[in-house]
Amino acid sequence: MLIIIHQDIICNDIKISCKSGKQNNHIIHNEKVSCLDISSFRLGRFQNLKDQVDYCRQHHEDCFIMLNYIGDTAHKYNIYYLNREDLNIGPYNMWDTVGLEYRCDTDIRAKIIPKMSHQLWMWIPIDTLNKITTIDTNINLPM
């Protein structure tokens, strides 16, 4: 059975979080890393950073399916899969204040940006994702 709830999907009791993101190069642990940048929870309803981080570390989904646009003019996308247990958001004591955001580097970079409704952003290294396929949506439709 397939149930769609907002942007998330529950299929055969598996909770899937669907995300789209952009591929960028970032410096994590002093290394240049090709990452998929995705946004996640808006955490403004929580009173403090500890509560926000504790919420992010809970397993609200079983896995992620992520869509990544590739190319400048082609309509191609990579689709990736990641188990939730493979996403390591560090505990509260690992978070630092950097400029106007909170940041934690584990095998990913997690950021909470207060001026953006305390939204969680994650930079996930591409080499940690499981590529499912590439799709091409550049189809010729009759006018």
Image (tube, helix red, strand yellow):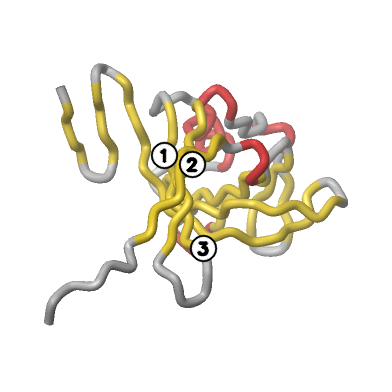
Question: Mark 3 and mark 1: span between their CA atoms?
Answer: 16 Å
- Residue 130 is situated, as x and y percent measured from the top left of the image, at 55, 35
Q: Looking at the figure, which quarter contains the C terminus? A: bottom left
Q: Quadrant of residue 45?
A: top left
Q: Amino acid at mark 2?
A: Tyr
Q: Earlier in the sequence, mark 1 or mark 2?
A: 1
Residue at 53% across / 60% down in the picture?
Answer: 22
Residue at 51% across / 32% down in the picture?
Answer: 82
Q: Secondary structure at mark 1?
A: strand
* Residue 122 in view of the camera: yes
Residue at 48% across / 25% down in the picture?
Answer: 58
| Residue that protrudes farthest toward the right in the picture | 30
Q: Secondary structure at mark 2?
A: strand
Image: 27 above or below 126: below
Q: Earlier in the sequence, mark 3 or mark 2?
A: 3
Question: Mark 1 and mark 2: span between their CA atoms?
Answer: 6 Å
In the depicted view, which residue is nearer to us: 76 or 68? 76
Q: Earlier in the sequence, mark 3 or mark 1?
A: 1
Residue tagged 2: 80
Is 130 on the left or on the right of 30, as rendered? left
Residue tagged 3: 70
Graded by Cα atoms within 10 Å as few (under 14), some (14 to 19) or many (20 or more), the crowding at tag 3 reads some
Residue tagged 1: 65
Residue at 70% across / 41% down in the picture?
Answer: 95
Question: Mark 3 and mark 2: span between their CA atoms?
Answer: 13 Å
